[in-house]
Image: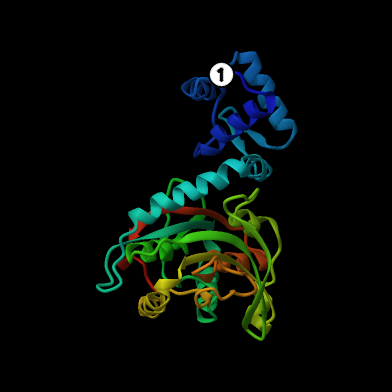
Amino acid sequence: MLLSDDKVRHTILSIVKEETGPIGSRKLSDKLKEIGLELSEAAIRYHLRILEERGYITKVGNFGRKITSKGLSELKRANVPYRVGSFLAKKEEQMYRSNFDIESGTGEILVNLCKFERKYLDQILDIFKECYRLGLATSPLVKTTETNALLNHNEVGLYYISGIAIDGILLRHGMNVNLRYGGVVEFKDFVPVRFIDMVGYESASISSLELFSARPYSVLSVLDKGDGECPATFREVPGIAYNELIKIKKKLEEYYIDGVLSIGKPNQEVLGIPVSVDRAGVALATSSTPLAVAQERGIEVEVEIMVDVLDYNSLEMP
């Protein structure tokens, strides 16, 4: 396999990231061979030195090297085009895996995972509840974990319902959902007014998660004063399904699943966004909006989207 030096280093960085602890040169060499990339010991040392000099990895005694926060940011930057396509493919797969039934309140539902220092758990749980109360979160229902392989020492993980779970539910009711945009919605007096920034999923250079991570928000201002910005997504469904869509929304509220900012009637624009012919638009606050609030409050949070499906009844109100 012939790759540029940058692609080789990004490949090495990806392998280091996937390890739960420091990785040594020999294991790294084996991992590279597994994907068809054979490098001499000298070449591996050279690339590791470059990555260290750039601050992307750090040496941990004689145990090997681990990725730094700067290295994680570099991977995000480098992998954006791939991850947008990967996101859309993963969304389709996970929508089919989710089988939550709104009549019985049973089944598995799609979840994201966030992780943070354990000392912030109560504060973040309160943020989820407050955001949901104001319609700025998909759900307040969560499940904590301290055993996930992605967690570091002194970290706790929190599973929470993904906004894509709603798309899966609509799909199970025969609605073809077209997730079109990720963006930012302006609020005035606690009311969503318009999209002020957005990117198209099909042609994006960044995903809505990228948008969430890369720009500052003022969601905290929405919570406190009613004015500010909130990350959001926009999708379309067949206009003929509008009445059924409203019924499903009301039913989901019984299970503490919502986050709907606005639903338009067929051919009616939603928060300033026109819809396709004979389609109805739906704007949702992103399920990770509470984590944007946490970041505004100085809490470092990492997010993994659509990590799994969990039994709905294993999730709890904080």
Please, which residue is most extreme toward the right here?
A: 53
Please, which residue is most extreme toward the left here?
A: 104
Q: Nearer the viewer, residue 279 or 78?
A: 279
Q: Is residue 244 left or right of residue 155?
A: left
Q: Nearer the viewer, residue 172 or 192?
A: 172
Vertical relation: 142 (above or below) 5: below
Q: Residue at x 60, y 18 (%)?
A: 2
Residue 251 visible in rendering: yes
Quarter of the picture holding the N terminus:
top right
Q: Which residue is mark 1?
A: 1
Point out residue 162 in the picture as x, y percentages from the top left corner: 46, 62
Vertical relation: 66 (above or below) 94: above
Q: Nearer the viewer, residue 116 or 206?
A: 206
| Quarter-of-image position of residue 58 | top right
Q: Nearer the viewer, residue 269 or 2?
A: 269
Point out residue 245 in the picture as x, y percentages from the top left corner: 41, 74
The amino acid beneath tag 1 is Met
Classify mark 1: residues with Cα within 10 Å, few (<14), some (14-19) or many (20+).
few
Q: Residue at x 56, y 76 (%)?
A: 268
| Quarter-of-image position of residue 232 | bottom right
Point out residue 36 in the picture as x, y percentages from the top left corner: 50, 20
